Amino acid sequence: MPKARLLLSGIIIITVVGVAYLLNRLPKTVAVMEPTNFPWLYHPLIAHRGLHDNNHLVPENSMPAFAKAIEEGYAIELDVAMTNDQQLVVYHDKKLRRGMGVDRYLAELTFAELSAYKIFGSEQTVPLFRDVLSLVAGRVPLFIEVKNEGKVGEMERRLYEELQGYPGPYAIMSFNPFTLQWFRQNAPEVPRGQLAGSFEVSDYEVEYAGTTRLPWYKKIVLEHLLLNFISRPHFIAYEIKNTSPDRLARLKKLGIPLLGWTVKNKAEYEEYKGKFDNLIIDAVLPEL
């Protein structure tokens, strides 16, 4: 046991020292761009999964939610996943239980099979990414979160192909630094944002949405943005509730736009609007 404890202590010390070292190098691991070239990163506010109503009548990540965001002049954040037959669709969860009451994973189904289910008790089905692009048609900025926890390459390639010729401003975001690395290497002109936060996951999220619960060492690496040297992001989108004053100061020292996710109510908006360059906001948007 003493040897095991000594080994564990050594691992912890090395980890802490490594984190401290890499934190000091963070400013060297981002891609700084001129703010005047990308004013839409700062304004307007960003509607989280479209302008929905917490899935009462207008579901998240649905065509009506995107149409409403366009009508109100908000930027749109949306999630892109890939079906078993390699169709790009707009849906957040890996598992379909929360949104459709089906205990299956999206990646197991073809698009035709997925389309048999309605989302959140509405008449809406999961839209194809290309249909959302046709709807938005450049009228508001898009913040596209790539949901890829598997092998990087094919999904990213297909996504970039579907974006060819798109007439409006857009950025790619992901929690996966290797997805951003793909865009850095293959589409460096596309603004890329590194998503990060506490990576704390509830039992509900695991059971109903299929959210991955990461091991502690991966959480440390991703929470502290230690793979920025791989992704070289143009901006950071960070969880608002995991930002102490010290962390905010470190993030701002990077010298790139800092977005905050996800504002749930007016009180949170008032608290965080002066701390971030822009905010990703849930269904409370019409009340602001």
Image (tube, grey):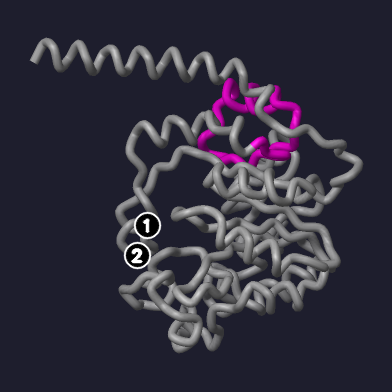
Q: Amino acid at mark 1?
A: Glu
**Is 214 a magenta residue?**
no
Q: Along the line of sight, which residue is nearer the eye, 187 or 234? A: 187
**Residue 2: x and y, percent?**
11, 10
Q: Is residue 158 above or below residue 151?
A: below
Q: Quadrant of residue 275?
A: top right
Real-space CA distance between mark 1 and mark 2, rounded to the nearest whole angstrom: 5 Å
Q: Name the quadrant of the N terminus.
A: top left
For this view, does 68 lie left or right of residue 59?
A: right
For this view, does 111 lie left or right of residue 61?
A: left
Residue occupying image coordinates x 91% and y 41% = 36
Q: Amino acid at mark 2?
A: Tyr
Evaluate whether residue 148 shows in this view.
Answer: yes
For this view, does 203 lie left or right of residue 248?
A: left
Q: Which residue position holds label 2?
A: 208
Disc 2 secondary structure class: helix
**Is 241 a magenta residue?**
yes
Q: Which residue position holds label 1?
A: 205
Q: Name the quadrant of the C terminus.
A: bottom right
Q: Quadrant of residue 145?
A: bottom right
For this view, does 208 lie left or right of residue 54?
A: left
Discs 1, 2 touching: Cβ within 8 Å? yes
Question: Residues in magenta?
Answer: 232-258
**Residue 87: x and y, percent?**
55, 75
Q: Residues within 10 Å of mark 2 (few under 14, many from 20)?
A: many
